[in-house]
Amino acid sequence: MSNSYHMPVLPKPDGKKVTINVDGRDVEVPEGTNLVEALKTIGIATPHFCYHPDLPVAGNCRQCMVETDGPRGMGLAIACYTPVRAGMKVATDHSSEKVKTARKAVMEFQLANHPLDCPICDKAGECSLQDNYMSAGGQTSRMREGIGKQYKGSPENRHQDSKGQDRGGKHLDLGPTVILDQERCILCDRCVRFMRDVAGSEQLYIAGRGDHAFLSTFPGSELSHEYDLNVTDVCPVGALTGKHFRFHQRVWNLVSTQTIDPTDSLGANITVDHYDGQAWRIMPRRNPDVNKSWIHNDTRLAYQKLSENRLAAGLFGKNEIPLSQATSRLGELVRGARKLALVASGHLTLEDNAAILALAQFLGSRAEVFGGSWLPVGKPDNIARSGDPVPNRLGQKLLGIADNLDELVRRAKEFDVLVVVGHDLWKIAPSKAKALEAIPERIVLSAWHDDSVAKATLSVGIRSWAEVRGTMVNCQGRVQMMQAAPILPSPDLEPAWQILSSAGRLGWTSELDAFRFAQGRIPALAGLTYRNIGPMGRILEGVVA
Amino acid sequence: MARTVPRPEMTLAEKAYVPEIVKGLKVTMGHFLRGLFTPETLPVQSYPETPSVIPRNYRAKHRLMKRPDGEPRCVACMMCSTACPANCITIQAGESADDRIEKKPVKFEIDLLVCVFCGLCAEACPVDAIRMDTRIVALAADSREKFKVGLKDLMSWEPKDYPDNDTQSQKAPGGLLNAEAKKQWGIS
């Protein structure tokens, strides 16, 4: 396998166009792109395995064959590595029998040693091999049963290397997160390219030659990287599967809700895949300007916390009380406070923070808003994380909430009521937060039974990040939408803005009221609606230099 | 649109009423006397004294097929629960102890009260693991929970209750004790 490939040129929204002839019709496509991308812009899907828009082009699966004109007339070429040229002629499977038979033949080779594992394969339902078989293959097998297939699960194929490590076979443990099934692998080497060119840590390679080639880790080492679960996404078949999702749910049952990464200020675009009122996994959602197609392992596993240790009711001291009672008690305490400290959170949406500001505005000089975070800011890894674990830090700043938690600690004695919204102060910095225990009434709004809830005199359960609709501003100054997945642990849970709105009698009925309040505070949000923010987000002008 | 169906024309004898009554009484008395003297010739079953005969292909309560080592043949692919129009099958998958099988159900629950006995689950199964040939049609329990049958219930059937000539019903490939599978996979 060659070691240097080129990244594909992707179409730009304002790029130049050239005219090419596809299936006898002249069409305009973006200049400089490859044929897979060019044909995609005019609505023709080309089946492929090894091509991935965010990985270097390898061109080894040969599934994307089209006919193009050359010096010797029309001939087959791979669409993923053929750049468009003004005036070129292209024939796809819509007009060319040759392309159809070529794709069918490639498909037959791909399936020659592929097991019929679909019923027990976690990829079934979102598998390129299944999709392409339906579109390009469709042949009956010419294999006789039991002959021609290399059954790699048998003991003779389960070989160990000189260091005693399992190197061949089915369900091989590659490392802490990923399991490999060599029999299902079609050797597209996407995972190899991901680890080498995106993760920057070459841990996988294709060993052996020809029919005996197999995917493996290097001798004596394992696949272990903080982005290694992305190899299970790029894998077009079920060869690489993540241990966290293995056998948990069939993918055709899952419904995706588009939201954004709650663990980092880059706000990687993700989907929460849910079924039957439960989140089963998180998948990356491609956004070329934010996270490409990648997410960090911690982001991917964030769904596991959505059903664990949830605060689904109110807590008065240690006693559980119904949410409605907790909410009304919160309202009484807030309205009757002599001096109230409101702690906003960069972990919550703009809407929730807007509600905090609106509540402070309602209470006038009796209330003060504190914000920011004690969490340290790390370095960006240039893949899908900015290093800042507070997702909406910029949004909070834009709303005019200062980074002044230390001031709150210093002046703690001045206040008689503290309201902390979705911000686990006691977990982040227990030594600093200890001073806040001087405030007699400590009210915590939290989605989890966290350390702050343990220190609170009154706690109110709220919806978690996956269950709210709202917006966040990422570190690029991009406002992004979060949609609510229907996975509430208790149907009574309300988002933080709603609880605060009833405490301050703001009369807000939907997220839009909160968003309009935020628009009043952030001029750059003017003219935006939930609809025109769209799934890819919108850059706010003049927010980040 | 309404359609008028003409009434059949009656003959004079039919219009006279009494001869038809006599004819009807003849049929009734015929059956009565037949039941009195030769009841075995009647085309009815004396249920419940004699149990009703249910054909093997009648869609009755489900059973799960077993491998020779007693593990379920089911590979937890969830085709049945996907095909189920009543959504009455709940499956939780887990790792099988047998390397070559990989996946097995750790929970397989059918809510017989929700089931519509359509047979699509048996139709969808790629490994012939679920069948509806138990001929158990009278289901009774004293709570709704007891109608949710699990792995243990679905697999507690006796091979002797099923025909010997149905080889699939008695043995299936796979399983740690299956000699045939061992031969095929080349392990002793």
Image (tube, rainbow, N blue to C red):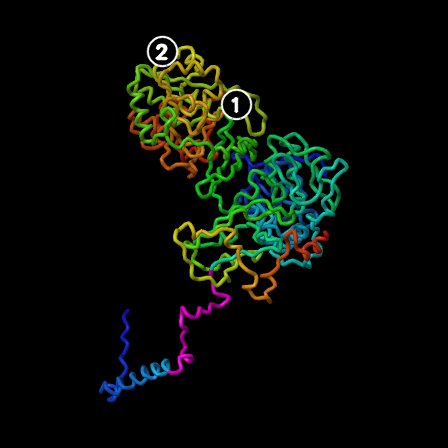
- Count of picture labels: 2
Measure the alpha-carbon separation of dots 2 and 1. Answer: 31 Å
Residue B128 lies left or right of residue B53; in this view the side is right
In the image, farthest residue toward the right: A162
Quadrant where the N terminus of chain A sits is top right
Q: Find residue A230 and report its horizontal and vertical position in percent.
A: 59, 36
Residue wearing tag 2: A414
Picture layout, residue B185 above or below residue A294: below
**Which residue is found at the position 65% from the left and 41% from the top?**
A180
Picture layout, residue A463 above or below residue B170: above
**Which residue is found at the position 33% from the left and 81% from the top?**
B32
Residue A426 lies left or right of residue A135; in this view the side is left
User: Can residue A308 be seen in the rendering of this structure?
Assistant: yes
Picture layout, residue B65 above or below residue A379: below
Q: Which residues are magenta?
A: B37-60
Q: Which mark is residue B186?
A: none
Q: Chain of mark 1?
A: A
**Which residue is found at the position 27% from the left and 75% from the top?**
B4
In the image, farthest residue toward the bottom: B12
Q: Find residue B141 and report its horizontal and vertical position in percent.
A: 41, 55
- Classify residue A510 by image quadrant: top left
**For numbered disc 2, what is the local secondary structure?**
helix
Q: Find residue A277 and report its horizontal and vertical position in percent.
A: 44, 41
Of mark 2 and mark 1, the one earlier in the sequence is 1
Q: Find residue A127 and report its horizontal and vertical position in percent.
A: 58, 46
- Name the amino acid, label 1: Asp
Q: Which mark is residue A388?
A: 1
Residue B33 lies left or right of residue A286; in this view the side is left
